[in-house]
Image (cartoon, grey):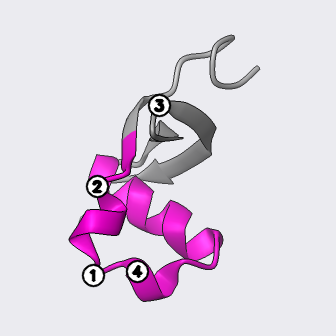
Amino acid sequence: MKKSKMTLFAIYKNGIHLGNEKGKDIDDAINKYLVASFFEEFLDDLEFKSLYSGKIAMKSIHYS
């Protein structure tokens, strides 16, 4: 079984940086962030999830 490469993503809600999460892609990282934030019941709510975005985290900007 081949392992997927995990990438660190910066997670945003309405343009505000909330934190970082590792994932295979941005959607995976957002889903993991929502679960960690106790919003698991909203994983299927596309309108709620549309408030969140992400991009590859950059050292010295999103983490040290």
Residue pictured at 55% horizontal, 50% vertical: 21
Instruction: From the image, give the main secondary structure of the stretch colored magenta.
Output: helix
> Which of the two discs, 1 and 3, sits closer to the camera?
3
Q: Secondary structure at mark 2?
A: loop
Q: Dot 3, crowdedness within 10 Å: few (<14), some or many (≥20)?
A: few
User: Which residue occupies the foreground of this view, 45 or 35?
Assistant: 45
Can I make out residue 8 in this image?
yes
Q: Residue at x 53, y 61 (%)?
A: 33
64 relative position to 35: left or right: right
What SS does tag 1 mark?
A: loop
What residue would you read off at disc 4?
A: 42
**Left or right, residue 13 beside residue 46:** right
Residue at 49% across, 39% down? 12
| Spatial separation of the CA atoms under disc 3 and disc 4 | 19 Å
Magenta range is 26-53
Tell me which residue sits at (45%, 88%) in the image.
41
User: Who comes first in sequence, dot 1 or dot 2?
Assistant: 1
Indicate whether residue 51 is drawn in magenta.
yes
Please state which amino acid type lies under the numbered disc 3.
Gly
Task: Specify the farthest residue to the top.
Answer: 60
- Tell me if mark 2 has few (under 14), some (14-19) or many (20+) residues whose alpha carbon lies within 10 angstroms of its own: few
- Residue denoted by label 3: 15
Give the residue type that dot 4 points to: Phe
Label 1 amino acid?
A: Asp
